[in-house]
């Protein structure tokens, strides 16, 4: 299996490539999202002016380095692993905040601030205001800024040579050079013997870029998606038929379903792993990102796929029990809770 070719001589468990975004968290009622024309419970792309107005309203006291893959790399380190991140920030105070905050967590990050066009110099570091409602559902207002200018030259081959797994986010497909970045990253992973993992990120991304994702999933060792993304990718509306289609991929696939747990699929395995028990859902931001962190930690430390899924469920359960996508305590303190479980729920 591809999983067996991971070698201990590599220095990074996971190298993530994604959007570098500073997250700002605020609690709100339903009226605020409507006031700014945001669709509740979704990710909304906004312009610089709207982003500035929202983040000024919320303040920066809860700002932290974020973005989907960046959140995953932080989770890997919190579990006791090692990780690096590749993304584009601007040469501004927000970019400095992102860089310093991400490095503080233990994630290796070298900021890329090269500007290939005159327009790029005017952009600021990407930011996302995460509005958390009383039900824990989050509404995101994202201004990508400089993150959207990631390009193939930002990918340093030496970083890929140091990684066991290269993890890519589907959100990059919307960037001007996104296709080139994703394809080169997958090439570099293959060239240096790293496993390739891909998150589909968002149903709208799958609708817009299904052809690219089909190309990448044919090369991927691991695919992460939720049920909506999986159905759009496979073209199958019935979940059972969708899961069957994913099980025929060359690598393994994980389909997350929130509180209903996740399906882990490969040519030799098809199993349902329950979600971690949570007393109260506070904020669902980052649940999928931290699920991937737990799974990838297990994957890079020789655990079987079911144990990887248990680790993912544990990390996701921990993150939805708090505000924000950054673990408030080291996940390594709870890691053995998942590793010691000896039963799973059959599909």
Image: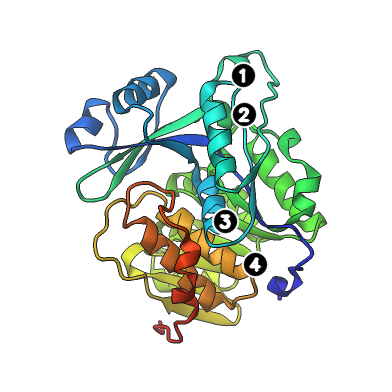
Secondary element at image label 1: helix
Does label 2 or label 3 sit earlier along the sequence? 3
Find residue 305 and report its horizontal and vertical position in percent: 56, 75
**Residue ID at (43%, 77%):** 272
Q: Is residue 248 left or right of residue 242?
A: right
Does label 4 or label 3 sit earlier along the sequence? 3
Q: Is residue 232 visible?
A: no
Which label is found at residue 149? Answer: 2
Mark 1 vs mark 3, CA separation in Å? 32 Å
Q: Which residue is the site of mark 4?
A: 300
Q: Which residue is the site of mark 3?
A: 77
Does label 4 or label 2 sit earlier along the sequence? 2
Residue 82 location, quadrant: bottom right
Q: Which residue is the site of mark 1?
A: 120
Mark 4 vs mark 2, CA separation in Å? 30 Å
Question: Are discs 4 and 3 less than 8 Å apart at CB?
Answer: no
Secondary element at image label 4: helix
């Amino acid at each position: 299996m591809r999983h067996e070719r991971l070698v201990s001589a590599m220095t990074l468990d996971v190298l993530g490539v994604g959007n570098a975004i500073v997250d700002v968290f605020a609690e709100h009622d339903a009226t605020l999202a409507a006031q700014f024309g945001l669709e509740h419970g979704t990710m909304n792309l906004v312009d610089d002016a709207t982003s500035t107005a929202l983040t000024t309203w919320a303040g920066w006291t809860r700002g932290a380095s974020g973005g989907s893959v960046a959140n995953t790399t932080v989770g890997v380190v919190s579990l006791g692993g090692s990780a690096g991140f590749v993304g584009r920030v601007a040469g501004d105070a927000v970019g400095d905040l992102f860089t310093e905050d991400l490095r503080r967590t233990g994630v290796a990050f070298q900021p890329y601030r090269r500007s290939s066009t005159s327009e790029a110099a005017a952009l600021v570091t990407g930011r996302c205001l995460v509005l958390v409602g009383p039900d824990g559902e989050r509404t995101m207002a994202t201004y990508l800024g400089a993150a959207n200018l990631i390009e193939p030259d930002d990918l340093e081959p030496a970083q890929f040579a140091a990684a066991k797994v290269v993890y890519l986010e589907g959100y990059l497909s919307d960037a001007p050079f996104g296709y080139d970045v994703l394809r080169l990253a997958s090439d570099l992973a293959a060239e240096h013997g790293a496993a390739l993992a891909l998150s589909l990120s968002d149903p709208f991304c799958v609708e817009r870029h299904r052809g690219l994702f089909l190309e990448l999933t044919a090369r991927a060792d691991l695919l992460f998606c939720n049920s909506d993304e999986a159905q759009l990718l496979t073209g199958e509306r019935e979940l059972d038929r969708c899961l069957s289609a994913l099980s025929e991929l060359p690598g393994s696939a994980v389909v997350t379903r929130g509180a209903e747990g996740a399906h882990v699929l490969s040519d030799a395995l098809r199993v349902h792993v329950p979600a971690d028990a949570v007393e109260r859902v506070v904020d669902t931001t980052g649940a999928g990102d931290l699920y991937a962190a737990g799974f990838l930690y297990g994957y890079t430390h020789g655990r079987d796929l079911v144990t990887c899924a248990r680790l993912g469920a544990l990390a996701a359960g921990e993150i939805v029990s708090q505000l924000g996508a950054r673990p408030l305590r080291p996940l390594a303190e709870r890691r053995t809770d998942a590793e010691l479980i000896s039963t799973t729920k059959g599909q």
